[in-house]
Amino acid sequence: MNNFEFKNPTKIIFGKDSIKKLENEIPENAKVLLLYGGGSIKKNGIYDQVQAALENFSVIEFGGIPANPEYSVLLEALEVIKTENITYLLAVGGGSVIDGTKFLAAAALYEGHSPWDILVDKKRTEVGLPFGTVLTLPATGSEMNSGAVITRKETKEKLGMGGPGLFPQFSILDPQVITSIPERQIANGVTDAFMHVLEQYMTYPDGALLQDRFAESILQTLIEVAPRILEDPTDYKAASNFMWSCTMALNGLIQKGVPTDWAIHAIGHELTALFGIDHARTLAIIAPSHYKYNFESKKEKLAQYAERVWNITEGNTDDKAYAAIEKTVDFLHGLGINTKLSEYTNDYEGTAETISKRFTDRGMLGLGEHHDLSPDKVAKIVKMAY
Ligand code: NZQ
Ligand code: ZN
């Protein structure tokens, strides 16, 4: 096991009707900016619950943060923060609203030339404006981590940022929010969380027994509950397991002390930036090709996943490893998620070269757990995914 440090300061408030506990978490004299997305919270009652809990606070609102939080929209919110002397941010939404809020938490205190530099120059945010979240869509884990991904349509870029100053102070997780989520987004949530675990697990055996079993148990839980939530989002038992699994998949715990990959996400972000494909679906497009292309270096772990998660006991290591890739693809198809780029766009020719060039230009020359996935190899993986 590798050496590691682990600190996660986010307070989780989990359970039925927990949104009202908001009032205990925000500092008394705070001037709050309530941030939300395209308006789903106004239809499903979450907005009313938040309003009721914020009754005794001074609150200004900023709605309209789109899925794949857009830089130009966030700049408008930044203006509000500055002119209104906002002291506390409250994100009510999924990964996009929470990530947008993290960007604002960083940008509000950033003293450099342009806030875009935070993303381009990979500036770590040590201290940000304090913020909390009310999670409305289990998927990204953003509610309990310090990362964010921001989109800039103008340049078709989608870049990551983060730092210890960007953990939410608290996150409220009421699994009842799931009842209003469209099926497509539930499938996305399961897929994203599943892929988060795989990115931190599907590398090479490293003797980290506990981390492996944490990862496998999250995968098994997602496999067990996914059909139940898709069938009946009011199934509270399934919803609560789904929600907690998504948070645990990317709150830092399972990646401590082990090698991690994250190449699927790096490539996937480019597909969202270029074609607007939902984040989770880009991962489903890239993962099968990535595992086939890197089969030799990943097959031990693929076979372990086959045995422990999919109960595949027949055959040798290679057989099991291949079967695991097939099982994963079947699982994704069962969620209604397509796994080929050509199923999302007719305009895919040249994508491999475009992404490969972008990685070269950005100096992303060695992705993956071995840091050996060069841009030309990335191009091959993307082509396999057409
Ligand atoms: O905008 P509204 O009206 O709220 O509607 C949203 C949006 O259209 C809707 N929705 C959310 N909660 C709902 C609901 N509809 C009905 N009922 C509810 N309770 O769902 C749509 C998608 O929302 P979004 O926030 O975009 O989805 P998700 O949570 O999947 O977030 C995706 C974003 O997170 C980033 C992705 O790249 C993408 O930009 N990620 C963030 C990560 C992180 N910070 O750790 C890690 C991930 O790998 C990912 O990259
Ligand atoms: Zn993801």
Image (spheres, grey):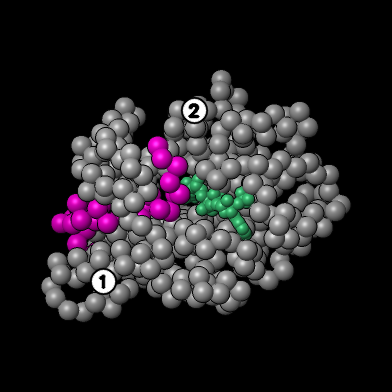
- Quarter-of-image position of residue 65: top right
Residue under label 1: 306
Which residue appears at 26% of the width and 44% of the height? Answer: 382
Residue under label 2: 154
Which residue appears at 57% of the width and 71% of the height? Answer: 233
Cα gap from disc 2 to disc 1, whole angstroms: 43 Å
Which residue appears at 52% of the width and 43% of the height? Answer: 68
The crowd level at tag 2 (other Cα within 10 Å; few <14, some 14-19, many 20+) is: few
Q: Main secondary structure of the magenta part?
A: helix
- Quarter-of-image position of residue 379: top left
Q: Is mark 2 within 8 Å of ligand 1?
A: no
The image position of residue 285, as x and y in percent, is 33, 52
Q: Which residues are magenta?
A: 274-301
Q: Is 144 drawn above or below residue 381 in the view shown?
A: below
Residue 1 is at least partly visible in this image? no
The image position of residue 371, as x and y in percent, is 25, 43
As helix, strand or loop, the secondary structure at mark 1 comes to helix
Q: Is mark 1 within 8 Å of ligand 2?
A: no
On residue 49, which mark appears?
none
| Type of the residue with mark 2 | Glu
